[in-house]
Image (cartoon, helix red, strand yellow):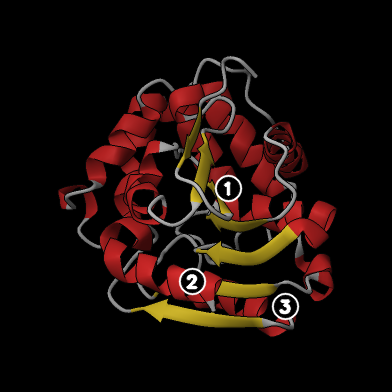
Amino acid sequence: MEKIYIDDVGSGFPLVLVHGYLGSSEMWCNQRDFFSKSCRVISPALPGFGESSNVQSLDSINKMAQFVIDIIDQKKIEKFNLLGHSMGGMIVQEITKIVGERVNKLICFATGSIGEIPGRFETIDETRKKLKIDGIDISFSRVPKKWFVKGDEDKNYYLCKNAVENVSLETADNALIAMKNWSGIKNLQNIKNETLIVWGDKDTSYNFDQVDTLNKNIKNSRLEIFKNCSHNVHLEKSNEFNILVEKFINQ
């Protein structure tokens, strides 16, 4: 894994952060700075994305989950808290399916249990088609704008621009295929871990039905909704998001 970028800072009980589609390790910068004061914060850039853009990408959620587990194993970490955003939320559900007994607390953020993502601003197939017709630059400037209420005028939008700088069409398409082919809905009832579900009420990527399904089917879960936030609550309202997660993992 010498080419893989893994941000590993702080000390204390580990918190593993898993980014989403077109994401990066850097997109967790506000969480890294906050949580590293009290936790060991581990945030890899998934193969093909962000700081790991030179690494061959993966085409299934299960492979991505195993990739994160391998990192945790290499670092000889037994138990950890686990937070996943968007596609990363699918990955952390899959990690919990594989090694659930090692997950202390689970945070599923702006995500769902069905890879097809019903109610998304456009279908996965439409995104794939536009990606191939329009090319990387147009697609990568079009999609991340939808993740903020303020669009590309949000002060943290630059993190999205940085994240996609070196991402290939193949990596983006592989991730879309991975999401489309994944479903975690049958496994939700098997998740016994205490779970926090976070959602912004202006999110056009994952609608309320998605997070409501998580909340109703994961027994030990609760749903927290952020008003006037879109898909990137952790960047739009970083402080409130961090305090919520901190209280949850420490209670």
Q: Position of residue 10 (x, y in %)?
A: 45, 44
Element under disc 2: strand
Instruction: Determine whether, in the image, residue 117 is placed left or right of residue 207.
Output: right
Quadrant position of the N terminus in the picture: top right
Element under disc 3: loop
The amino acid type found where label 3 is placed reads Ile
For marks 2 and 3 on the same chain, the one whose residue lies earlier in the sequence? 2
Element under disc 1: helix
Foreground residue, 30 or 114?
A: 30
For marks 1 and 3 on the same chain, the one whose residue lies earlier in the sequence? 1
Q: Position of residue 49 (x, y in %)?
A: 50, 29
> Crowding near pointer 3: few (<14 within 10 Å), some, many (20+)?
many
The residue lying at 68 percent from left, 29 percent from top is: 58
> Crowding near pointer 1: few (<14 within 10 Å), some, many (20+)?
some
In the picture, the disc for residue 124 is 1
User: Can you identify the residue that label 2 sits on?
Assistant: 198
The residue lying at 51 percent from left, 48 percent from top is: 40
Above-or-below relation of 88 to 66: below
Q: Is residue 58 visible?
A: yes
| Structural distance between the alpha carbons of marks 2 and 1 | 22 Å
In the picture, the disc for residue 133 is none
Instruction: Determine whether, in the image, residue 219 is placed left or right of residue 248.
Output: right
Foreground residue, 149 or 106?
A: 106
In the picture, the disc for residue 218 is 3
Which-is-in-front pick, marks 2 and 1? 2
Q: Position of residue 99 (x, y in %)?
A: 81, 53
